[in-house]
Image: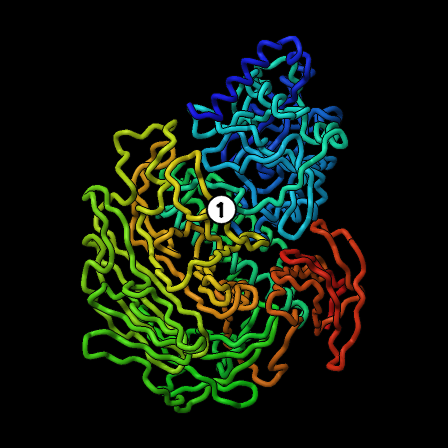
Amino acid sequence: MNSTKTYRYFLFAVFSALAVFSQAQTAWFADGYHGGVYGHYPMWQAKFMVEKLTENPGWKINLEIEPETWDTVSIKDAENFKAFQKYYSETGRFGRIEFVNPAYAQPYSYNISGESIIRHFSYGIAKTREYFPEATFLTYSCEEPCFTSSLPQILKGFGYKYAVIRNPNTCWGGYTSAFGKDLVNWIGPDGTTIPAVPRYECEELADNSTWQTDSWTNSNEFIANCFAYGIQYPVGMTFQDAGWDGGPWGNEYDPTEYTCWTPYIDMISGKVKPNDWKFSIEDVKPGLVWGAQVLQKLAQEIRVSENRLIMAEKLASLDYILSGEAYPVSDFAEGWRTLMLAQHHDCWIVPYNGRPGYTWADNVTRWTNTSNRIAEETISKLSDTKEGEQTCAIRVFNTLGQARTDVVKIDLPKDFNEKEIAVFNINDKQVPSQILEVNSGKNVLAFEAEVPAMGYSTFDIRSAKQQATEPSVKQLPDGRTRIETSFYIAEFDPAKGGEITSLIDKKSSNRQLVEKGEGLNGVRGYFYKEEKFHQSSDNKATISVVEDGALFTQIKVENQIAGNNYTQLISFAKTNPLINFELKIDWTGQLGIGAYDQSNNYDATDLKKAFYNDAFKLHLQFPLADAKGKLYKNAPFDVCESQLENTIYNSWDSIKHNVVLNWVDVENTSGDYGVALFSDHTTSYVQTRELPLGLTVQYTGKALWGRDYWVDGPTEIQYALLPHSKNWVDASVELASQSWNEPLIGQLSSVKNEMPEFSLLETCDNNLHVTSATLDGKDLLVRIYNTSEKQSHEVHWNCNGADFELVDLSNNTISPIKKNKNKNGQWVTKLKLPQFGFQTVKLTQVKL
């Protein structure tokens, strides 16, 4: 027993001896239900809640029910559901029932985009009010660790007053840090503050459990510890799974009063002094099975749909303003509905649950396919070519708030038979281009496009010779392959598994980026059936040149890891410092990859589990030279400076936030140079004293609830490296990530001269980002997010509205925005945004 626990038991003994005193003090308990038709919700639940509330006049419940549940229940259990609606309207909403989490599919939040989180609340609140029009949403609380650092800003945007930052009875997937007493001021990264009930600093993880903290029940010991620590109004919490039929949750301590969250926080506000808590994303400690192939695939599918829907909304808004094309409100609602279901927390923590063909993972594929179809149908409408019409141009769209120059790829039309083709911009200047042959046998045209912000530019396709380029690849006498571009000199060594043994940044005084004697981009992992580590440098690799043209050079590395073939495609752009990677591993059989084999000794109550330890999982290694400085990582509407010495843990009671959402960035010790790593899916990154940066690739073996996590087909991931001078802000790393996730879109066009170029708006700052653009009737809503310390910004508009307004996330007007015309005829608006803050600008009755 550790010293902290010993002290706890001493305190408990003292307070037990003073029973008369302690028992006279009241404690509170937040009971309730969690679930929904996609998780768990029996059709008798509505009747049961009314009956038990009637039988127990002192009982109060907090509800965290998937809002779409009410669509089903209102049909399948219509009579009892009407009784529940009546009870809520007449009695429940006056302190007996509170809706605490209306998020459409109860996402974990830290693992998805900030825009996705906003849509969960927006669509979820609307759906809940379809059935409960008098519902209020004042306190956020959840059963699972559904938290992220920027929630204060999001919650306040929807009118919330309070929050609860604990999930005491369901910590399988993680928990939050312990901090403070009765109340804290939860301070988000942008400075927004919301009063919140924390996981108390004295609230420890429960004994003999890997899923509870001490406040999951009001035990005499827990309440005694609270009073001893100076907590004046201790409150416990359990949200029961919908379907549990015990009624009020039993509590040992007496007197305990059941409470809904808002009345409880109203009661103690003003009676206690909250501590300020600058809650970091690292205060969210998630323990998912990072590296499991099933989790990897669904995270990739979710990321694709997030990106495509956001891009489709922006382009549909542009199309409406330019051509009057109807904005597909219902289509987008369905696209978001299926994406939000795919983001359900159960998809991530129990992906294998469900009958064959309809597991959570199967459903993610089904749901995201629907979202993607809707997005692609919307985007395809931007093409103005008709069947049989001669194609003569390509219109390239940019969905970012900044003008950009990047590579766009487009399938060549079937009727285009020219062997020599070239691409020209609107100034009749030929731009660099390459013809790529893909596996399907069809040809793809890639070319460099300069496109204005939130708009498009038009390019001509002509029969002409492509511009000659010097080769970038050279074979060295010792067998190494050297690539030289305007940005880098890179050397691949087949004798060391095809790793990059030298990477020189020509733009930074020929800085060497690879640690001496090491190799960049190798893979390493522990194969526990063999009881040994395998790494890429164990074998000699084959290196070949796939492309070497005007736009980029691509190298293919073929190798084996533990007898399994894998390939890596590495692409160096000629005009962009980003280095792109594609990894594919073809597995043969089911291998054991991880710290150790738990197939015969898995126990849910054991603190230590093999799947926690990333050091033994197969991971990509980036032994960067002079990269022992600070590490930054992005999160929804946030970028966090990590305080971790390393990311490795092996026990449930020591979980660390080791999550990469979109990117992590490591600096050198002087802070004037860094390297960012982009990932195509949410997963974990690795950082140790020996390894500045790694990316988790594969885990196989036992994990949560003793389930086998296996491989089903090849593992395929995409990632990128961005070396840069200065820090992540000055290097515009967030913009580079957004560009990577929202690539330029090319559409065939038959029109060359009618408005060949257009820009809807421009943010005028590389750290001011357009995260969404949508239409509400005839009003344009644009959300803008700031990642720099600079707070005063301008946005230039090439469209107009009857009024420019700042609105909250419920579309309520906050204040009007003044607009002025500049010398170019653009409307100019000034915004004041703190770092990591966002604002929604509304243009009413928008028009050109």
Question: Is residue 358 among the parts visible in the rendering?
Answer: no
Q: Which residue position is annotated with label 1? A: 342
Above or below for 457 versus 133: below
Amino acid type assigned to the residue bearing label 1 in the image: Ala
Viewer-proximal residue, 788 or 326?
Answer: 788
Choose between 209 and 158: the one closer to the eye: 209
Residue 198: quadrant of the picture: top right
Q: Secondary structure at mark 1?
A: helix
Q: Is residue 297 left or right of residue 7?
A: left
Q: Let me know if residue 545 appears in the view.
A: yes
Q: Position of residue 103 (x, y in %)?
A: 60, 42
Q: Residue at x 67, y 50 (%)?
A: 191
Circle 1 crowding by C-alpha within 10 Å: few under 14, some 14–19, many from 20: many
Residue 274 lies, with reference to residue 424, above or below; the image says: above
As rendered, which of 833 and 821 lies closer to the eye? 833
Q: Is residue 430 above or below residue 727?
A: below
- Above or below 215: residue 575: below
Whole-percent x, y for residue 334 in the image: 57, 51
Which residue lies at the image location 54% right of the left edge and 63% below the top edge?
734
